[in-house]
Each structure stands twice: as C-alpha cells, then as structure tokens.
Amino acid sequence: MSASKDLVEAWRQHLALDRRRSTHTVRAYMATAERLIAFMEGHRGEAVTAAGLSKVDQADLRAFLTVRRRDGIGNGSAARELSAVRGFLKFVGGEDARVPLLKGPKVKRGLPRPISPDEAVALAGDIAETAREGWIGARDWAVLLLLYGAGLRIGEAMGLMGDILPLSDTLRVTGKRGKTRIVPLLPQVRTAIEAYVAACPYPVAREETLFRGARGGPLSAAIIRRAVQGARGRLGLSDRTTPHALRHSFATHLLGRGADLRSLQELLGHASLSSTQIYTQVDAAHLLDVYRNAHPRA
C-alpha cells in the first residue's frame, strides 16, 4: 500500500473509531482526502507524503477549491470540502500542525434563510475538527447535532442534565416557561452524545449538567456561539449562520418534507401555532428561489 493510501486509511479509522462519525460522513471525508492527494500529486508532480502535506499552503488550497468549483460544486459543498481538507491536514500533521487559514466561498446575502444540510454538517464538522481537545470537539459536535437534528434551542441543550442517560429513542426537553416536550432522538444524535460522554474527562452525574466547559463547570452557550462565529468565518458562511439558525433549518426541512404545522409546533415547543407559521413563509421563499433558478421563463 502506498504512503498516501496509508494516510487515507488512517484518516478513515480516526473518523470511524475515534470520532465515531457516521458512515456517510466517513465516506465523504475520505473522498475529499483522496481528491486532495490526487490534486497535490498533479500540482507538484510528485508522490504525496505526510511531510509533503504539512507544506500545503493557502495558495495550494485556493487552487484545489478552484478545481472543485470547476467540477460544478456549490457553495455549501465547497464549504464542506474545505472543512474536510482542514480536518485531514490537521490529522496528518498532529497536534502541532499549522493548517493554513482560508475563507470558504461566500454565501449570497439576502433574506434570512435556513442553512442547507451540507452547510450544517460542514459547520459542525469544522468546529469539531478545530477544537483544542478531542473531547471538546466531540462535545461541540453533539451540541450542534441536537440543535439541527432535534430542533433544540441552545439554552435547552445547555440545560440538559446527566439524568437523560442512558439515552433512548426520545428525549424529554424543558423549554420556555418550564414547558416540557418529547422530541425524537435520531441515531446519529444519540451516537454523538454517547461519544461525548465517553470522551468527557469529567464524570457525568445525574444531578449535574450534561455538557461541561473546559474546566468542568457547566458549558456556556456563549462558547458555542463563539465557535460557530469562528467556523462561519473560516467557511465563508453568512453572518446569519448562528446556533439558532440550525433550529430554523430543522423546522424548515421538516416542513419541506411534509410535516404538518401542529406536529412541528409540538417538536419546537411553541406555545402558539402562530409562532410556528413563520416557517411556512420561509419554505415558500425557498420554493420561490427554486422556481426562479429552474423555470425557463422566470
């Protein structure tokens, strides 16, 4: 097996075993690593090694993204590609690796929009891969998946206690004004939480908060907001990409796939249906965008 294939295989094992990423994510990130290696071999005219990857600079990444954009990928996919490349380079270079900073493609500004699934995964992946410690990356990944995959408010995620363990297929959440609701827990979200608990250096007691800060105290929502702010800058995402935007995306994507307003109201914990109806406007705006981009007479 060549040195480059060894690197990709080590990356696969790291993602699957250490980071416990989903099969889909592992496959996508491996494909990105293979594309980067193939590009660098053609770009530099030599076989790629770990030492060679440590010398990848901003110009190399810019050239790589230019080629990928010529392949026809959009902004969301380009953002995910850059996030995967940065994670791969950091893995190959180790803890002291200096991964070149490069802003991702700009997202067109306009009316508030939920972020796409690609952008949501890229955002969470970038934050997890750039965390200063592995367990912190696992924590942030789990928090963001709760917002995007279960529609939690950031405060609701921060308020989860250790008594939710062991996890089941549903989660009881306490929202505004002490109102509780039951939300489904997707397997990917459950796996992310369990991976964080296993990696957390602090014991998770039933009467203490589930998510911990670096020093062991309750995790602050401000930490997650700052992490999202840094990631959206690196990925070139809109300033409207916030933790709460992940909750908006959860709602909009469910509505777009046929969820009814009453069910969505329950999942989001809205006191009145009028609070939920805003998502019909967002979804209509998305449909209008599709029409404008696809209809020959638009």
Image (cartoon, helix red, strand yellow):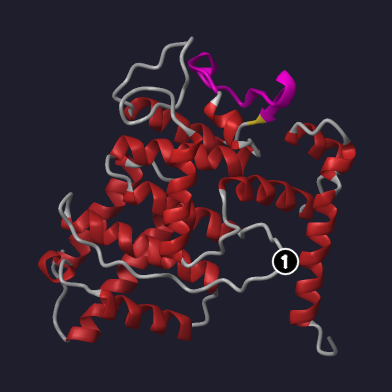
The N terminus sits in image quarter = bottom left
Which residue is identified by label 1?
Answer: 111
Residue nearest the observer in this picture, 242 or 298 = 242
User: Where residue 168 sits in the image (x, y, percent)?
Assistant: 58, 22
The range drawn in magenta is: 160-183
Q: Residue at x 28, y 75 (%)?
A: 58
Q: Residue at x 74, y 34 (%)?
A: 267
Q: Secondary structure at mark 1?
A: loop
Q: Residue at x 57, y 56 (%)?
A: 241
Above-or-below relation of 231 to 39? above
User: Where residue 35 sits in the image (x, y, percent)?
Assistant: 34, 73
**For the residue carrying disc 1, how many other residues have a C-alpha within 10 Å: few (<14), some (14-19), or many (20+)?**
few
Residue nearest the observer in this picture, 33 or 215 = 215
Position of 237 with respect to 292 (left or right) is left
Above-or-below relation of 273 to 228? above
Q: Residue furthest top?
A: 207
Position of 182 with respect to 271 (left or right) is left
Look at label 1 and name its amino acid.
Leu
Residue nearest the observer in this picture, 208 or 48 = 208
Above-or-below relation of 294 to 175? below
Please tell me whether residue 196 belongs to the stretch shown in magenta.
no
